[in-house]
Image (cartoon, rainbow, N blue to C red):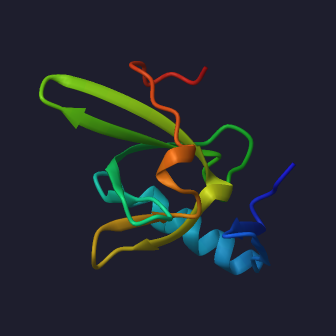
Amino acid sequence: MKDARTLTARGRTVERERQDVLRLGARLANAEGFRVIALDGRALGALENVRYEKHTDHPDDVLIRKRFLLWDRFATIAFDDVANVDPEGERVYLAVPSTAIEWSRSSTRS
């Protein structure tokens, strides 16, 4: 099981400092509507919401919404899979490729 202090991308695991986890959590809390970019560079959609269930210092999950014409699709990404937030560019970067994202019609967790 991963925890928020480790980040695995492209086969490398990096230990995050506690302050980095707190900063990333704060940036995500203010990133609603930001464009979400997967590890492979593909734009996935917009950050719809962040969910706090187990932790108070950072979100547990990030909800992404993808719109296509009149249809909405949702994906829930674990906080551990968020690599960075760029407030100036209004982008959220993930540490997982777009092929690892599972989409559903509902915004609820399965």
Q: Position of residue 109 (x, y in %)?
A: 57, 24
For image coordinates 28% across by 79% down, the residue present is: 88
Q: Position of residue 84 (x, y in %)?
A: 51, 72
Q: Position of residue 8 (x, y in %)?
A: 73, 66
Relative placement, left or right, of 109 versus 70 is right
* Residue at the farthest right position: 1
Relative placement, left or right, of 5 versus 74 is right
Up/down of 84 relative to 71, above or below: below
Where residue 72 sits, quadrant-wise, is: top left
Where residue 48 sits, quadrant-wise, is: top left
Relative placement, left or right, of 49 versus 65 is right
Up/down of 77 relative to 40, above or below: above
For image coordinates 72% across by 49% down, the residue present is: 55
Relative placement, left or right, of 57 versus 68 is right
For image coordinates 74% across by 60% down, the residue present is: 4
Up/down of 81 relative to 101, above or below: below
Q: Position of residue 31 (x, y in %)?
A: 37, 59
* Front-lying residue, 15 or 25: 15
